[in-house]
Amino acid sequence: MRPSDPLVIVATRIRVEERMLIEALERRRLPFAHIDDRRLVYRVGGPPPAWRAVFNRALSATRRIEVSRYCEAVGVPVLNAAATLDRCDNKIAGTLALHGAGLPVPDTCVALDPAHGTEAVAQVGYPAVVKPVVGSWGRGLARVNDPDAAEAVFALREQLPSPIQKLGYAQQYVPGRDLRVLVVGDRAVAAIERSSGHWVRNTARGARPTARTVDAALADLAERAARAVGGGILGVDLLENDDGRRVVLEVNGGVEFHGLAEAHPTLRIADLMIDHALELAA
């Protein structure tokens, strides 16, 4: 890759995060280009694009992994790698990777058919959270407090059209403070606590982000979680209870960071990401 080759932002639309990346690239006078993933067409075996590195910000999980798969095939550094996205975009794969690396995760049970979803919930106990295996922004989550509620949730899952939507993923409900840690490369660079009157505390659903100090234990846990899924630019979601114990919920491969930027106004998050991309391309 040549320094004159552009850093490419593959994004379905320009949101706050993509705008921050563009502004940082313009300020640093680095060549860049934006490509809408919906318009990406390539010929297998054709000449590789002259891209220095790619920020894969596609909204669709299906297109996102295909963008990374293509970049890797033609030798272009991409954030994040296809294997990382595969583990992050599928909650079963992510939980198996985290647990396999020895990280603390909520008690989790999987049913491969909704007819047996209530069995999965019974194994983790009530209250439990039933989650879609593929999804983001806190959509499709259901907290169930008794067998009747669990049965109703899985009866609805039975009617969904996609086989992956029918999978049952039940997790122990763990009360506590909701934390997100941003990991860039091998380093936890910032953290926030998300607060809301609702038990689902995504900033996309109006949760308020406040800055948290990344202490040594929190950094170690987040960095280990990032390594477990393959590393890159990642958002590690954790819960912390009153005695300080923490569990890892999931790792986000298409991480949104506007809440982190709001809580840490002096931290140049986009620049940290650009620095990491340039290191990969060197």
Image (cartoon, rainbow, N blue to C red):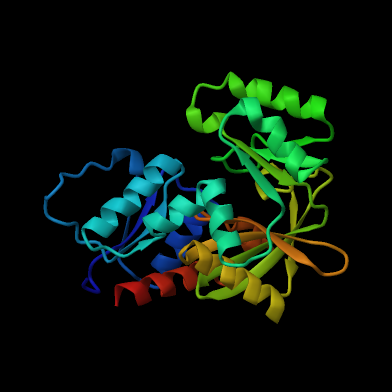
The image position of residue 73, as x and y in percent, is 23, 56
Taking the image as shown, residue 255 lies to the left or right of residue 49, namely right
The image position of residue 14, as x and y in percent, is 46, 48
Q: Quadrant of the C terminus?
A: bottom left
Nearer to the camera, 222 or 151: 151
The image position of residue 99, as x and y in percent, is 60, 60
As drawn, which residue projects farthest toward the bottom? 216
Q: Is residue 172 above or below residue 7?
A: above
Asked whether residue 198 appears in the rendered view, the answer is yes
As drawn, which residue projects farthest toward the right? 242
Nearer to the camera, 12 or 125: 125
Q: Is residue 212 above or below residue 91?
A: below
Nearer to the camera, 219 or 130: 130
The image position of residue 114, as x and y in percent, is 61, 27
Q: Quadrant of residue 83?
A: bottom left
Nearer to the camera, 35 or 108: 108
| Residue displayed at 33% across by 46% down | 66
Q: Is residue 5 above or below residue 134?
A: below
| Residue displayed at 28% across by 59% down | 72
Asked whether residue 264 appears in the rendered view, the answer is no
